[in-house]
Image (cartoon, rainbow, N blue to C red):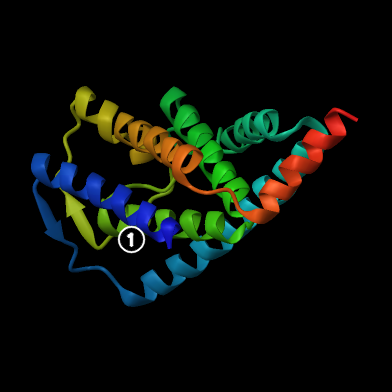
Amino acid sequence: MITIALVVIMIALIFVLKSLIFDLSINHNFQVIDAVTFITSMLCISIYEELSFRGIIFEWLTEKLGINLSILLSSIIFSLFHITNNGFDFLSFLNVFLAGVFLSFLIFKSGSIIPSILFHFLWNISLPTFVDSSVSGFMYSNLIEFDSSSDIYFQLFFGDKFGIESGLVVTLLLILGIIVIAKYIKLSPYSEAVRLKKLYNTYN
């Protein structure tokens, strides 16, 4: 439930901010068949990336290096995985890295990969559908269109070719999301047991 709430809050804040600055309209060429194809592909991508980067790489690194370093390294690898995507730049790297940290914390706190898959999936389908943004450099059919400005300052906050994931608005939202999960979400019994086991092995 917390996963859905976080996605809804983040997307809603982006939508409100863009609505206050840009004119919006409904895309009447939006096709249901395109939406079904898009949703299916995003589900596959979300499952694949979460299983690969959090389910395998993150878990393997955690076994070898502990939670903090594994979050850092797996998130860097996750970000570099997107380096060839259209419009990838420094802010894109930073935001995808922060997304990796956010999703890793989500898994660690929940003790399950399901919340990270769900967040990843809902985030990806929401970007083009509701805030007229590319998904990590790839543009899909959108339901709502914004008359976005090409002004460099607007691009700094709302992103450019890579999408809003290369904007400072998402940087701020991800940092706040990481703080919320790290500070206020209770650690699952499974994750607590793993943490205590590693702590015990460290001192014995």
The answer to whether 44 appears left or right of 1 in the picture is right
| Percent position of residue 82, x then y | 55, 38
| Percent position of residue 83, x then y | 56, 32
Q: Nearer the viewer, residue 42 or 197?
A: 197
**Quadrant showing the C terminus:** top right
The answer to whether 37 appears left or right of 188 in the picture is left
**Residue 122 in the image: above or below residue 104:** below
Q: Residue at x 37, y 32 (%)?
A: 171
Q: Nearer the viewer, residue 95 or 194?
A: 194
| Percent position of residue 165, x then y | 39, 38
What is the residue that sits farthest to the right in this orientation? 204
User: Callout 1, which amino acid?
Assistant: Ser
**Residue 167 in the image: above or below residue 116:** above
Q: Nearer the viewer, residue 38 or 5?
A: 5
Q: Residue at x 22, y 68 (%)?
A: 29
**Residue 169 in the image: above or below residue 59:** above
**Quadrant assignment, res 20:** top left
What is the residue that sits farthest to the bottom in this orientation? 33
Q: Give the secondary structure at mark 1.
A: loop
Numbered label tally: 1
**Quadrant showing the N terminus:** bottom left
Q: Which residue is mark 1?
A: 141
| Percent position of residue 69, x then y | 69, 28
The answer to whether 188 appears left or right of 149 in the picture is right
Q: Residue at x 41, y 32 (%)?
A: 175
**Quadrant assignment, res 33:** bottom left
